[in-house]
Amino acid sequence: MTQKMALILTLALCFSLTKIAYAQMAPYGTEARQRAAALITQMTLDEKVGQLTQAAGLKLSGLSAGPPDDLIAQGKVGSVLWLTDVKEINRQQHLAIEKSRLHIPILFGFDVIHGYRTVFPVPLGMASSWDPEVEEQAQRWAAEDARTAGIRWTFAPMVDIARDARWGRMVEGAGEDPYLGAAMARAQVRGFQGGSLGMDSVLACVKHFAGYGAAEGGRDYDASYIPEELFRNVYLRPFYAAERQGVGSFMSAYMDLNDVPASGNRWLLTDILRGEWGFKGFVVSDAIAVGNLVKHGYAKDPADAAYKAFNAGVNMDMASLTYSKNLAQLVREGKISEKQLDDAVLPILAIKYQLGLFDRPYVDESKVEAMLSRPEGLALERKLAARSMVLLKNENETLPLKSSLKNIVVIGPLADSGRDIEGGWTVEGTFGAGSKSHPVTVLAGVKNRLRSAAPITYVAGPMPQREFPSFFDDFLGIQQLPPPTAEEIRDTLAKVKSAAASADVVIAVLGERFGMSGEYASRASLDLPGIQEQMLETAAGSGKPIVLVLENGRPLDIRWAAEHVAAILESWYPGTEGGDAVADVLFGDVNPGGKLPVSWPRSAGQEPLYYNHNLTHDPEDAPNFKSRYWDVSSKPLYPFGYGLSYTKFDFTNLHLSKTSFKAGEATEVSVEVTNTGSVVGDAVAQIYIHQRYGSASRPMRQLEGFKRLRLQAGETRTLKFSLGKEELEFWSPQAKEWVVEPADFDVWAGEDSTAKLHGEFSVTR
Ligand code: BGC
């Protein structure tokens, strides 16, 4: 039999599991749909286009001349964004309800990404908890605040897979893994929307559909080239999970996807999203992405851009007003039918009904302040922040610190920066009159913890700056400072040296300013910016124990620190109560249990770096392995899934309920986890699989199960995970469909993606 024939036979015999669109529950009920359909029969062409138009609610230089009052009064705006002033929200809503002919309420949208006033850890941090409950609770809290303040639509969750730490927006998502990403996506949709959309929900918007994180060179907005199998097996998985969870809206991405901009990509927005998945909600473009189809060299002019985006499946145009100016004419010319227009409007109106906006359009201004200032939010934030931290190193049990320490030195400009500890995309910090959340810095947190028991010496040092500011810096009025002079550097280092000399311990709080990661914040190097590394090395020169607390939105090049400092705690941007939460972990009130949601590189040159890559003919762990770089190991500094605890765990007795079973059936993996240390702690059990052969090379490991659990000292628990169709199937590039193939598989259970405890099973025809 020729190889080709054998392959065809294998493909024909393998259990085919095409993901046929079994209709997703629409994010709105029959009544909402019927009311929407009835309303559409009364609408003029312009009013219909109005519902497909989202306008900036305020003056923004280069984007909008001011509140869109005239358009609202004429019924030509369906949604308004970037507005948080409650009085202004009510004023614009009154205009829509009282002045427009059909009194259709506006849907106000905003980026409520990780909290409203109480700011939770950045999403990459929350994903590090490996606990979907963390995301769900945080987003539920954020949704309650946002809803009370008039925001009924959030542009979250961001579920872009990020395999390259140079890409600044890694901070907004759940990292590199499709399985973890899918779990976090579902949790966030549940948090924002509840079980189903209703009066109490905030409409979620899963973004950026799709492939944005694969931007070439990690440069934000740059093109992505992703083969279909990689796209389906990795990049789409969290989006699909959000869709199954009932997410009501999708946001199309900015960049070119395989040469067709995502916001004008019919294969993506119609064939896959509506056709294969059966999505019934609506798609909004990313900001000005419809107009930008011209800039991409994809559309001839704004009319062509409106046509291409609409025809691809973008219901609503965010902020470019390209639909507003061109769609009606396209309908009059017969290029777009009125039926197509009605179909695009229907889900938007149905969702407005479902959210109860027609019945309760206004904000009760008297309730907002009390809601946003709920003190329980701070306690929740502190708890979730501590759950999100990852202990990367702890030599000689340097941590937890003893409360009896006499002389603590804190260094680093981030240690006392309230603005930075909350990270980017903070509602009141970004668009409001400044943050009202009163964030607790690490310096304040350590002081709070010790009260006045020990003197704390603080050496701040110069705040690092971006080489090239972003438009957000201009927008937020962030002042660009000149780099420190040689004298300032000498002076800072001398202060660090003398403070460290008399310290019992030095806590170095280093990393990136909040605007150094996020949108428009890609980097070519992953070094600690500014003179932070010099400060660290100077402090370490004292020979005193150094605890490095990282505040950042992506892994950094910390090779020197990993070798020379005693302990490293990754806190990400931990949020409003972040400093207290860091102190909780440093002093052992909380035992850290977070794990890395990304592979931690040694240097930027390793990127993109991810654990679930293929083996190649010269696999990395082979004795004669000699390919890849000759100057740096190909392995990460810390693997995906890694994180330490103040206790130790043992994984034993991996058992499979079946070691051979038919495609479509499942086996159950059980594993025993024991806390072998002397304090209570959280383990995260992780299950990885590998398919040894088939119609495609499969990743050397792929996460297909995890569970965070708390174990008392000495306690053992048995965990069970099912491996069936959902975990074993993949999109075969040769079969061009979803398959579970007859093959032999490896399975590993343990604490990170290098887990050793191993089993094997076979799938048969
Ligand atoms: C970002 C989106 C965001 C939108 C609205 C865009 O620049 O890419 O993530 O939701 O702005 O603020």
Image (tube, helix red, strand yellow):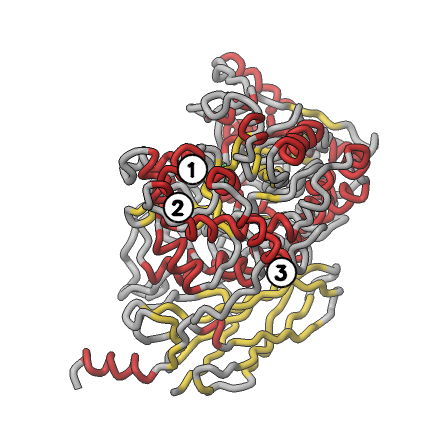
Q: Please tell me whether residue 323 is drawn above or below residue 598 in the rendered image.
A: above
Residue 501 in sight: no
First in sequence: mark 2 vs mark 1: 2
Identify the disc placed on residue 323: 1
Residue nearer the viewer, 683 or 543: 683
Q: Are marks 2 and 1 in contact (CB under 8 Å)?
A: yes
Which amino acid type corresponds to the residue marked 1 in the rendered image?
Answer: Tyr
SS under mark 1: helix
Point out the tag, 3 or 1, that comes first from the N-terminus. 3
Across and down, in percent, residue 172 comes to 53, 43
Mark 2 Cβ and ligand 1 under 8 Å apart: no
- Is tag 2's residue or tag 3's residue first in the polypeptide sequence? 3
Front residue (pair 89, 612): 89
The answer to whether the residue bearing label 3 lies less than 8 angstroms from the nearest atom of ligand 1 is: no
Q: CA distance from mark 2 to mark 3?
A: 25 Å
Quadrant location of residue 439?
Answer: top right
Q: Which residue is mark 3?
A: 29
Quadrant that contains the N terminus: bottom left
**Neighbours of disc 1 within 10 Å: few (<14), some (14-19), many (20+):** many
Residue 312 visible in rendering: yes
Q: Is residue 144 left or right of residue 740?
A: right
* Residue ID for mark 2: 310
Q: Residue at x 31, y 57 (%)?
A: 227
**Dot 2: element:** helix
**Image position of 550 (left or right of 286):** right
On the image, the x and y values in percent for residue 424 come to: 57, 35
Q: Give amino acid for label 3.
A: Gly
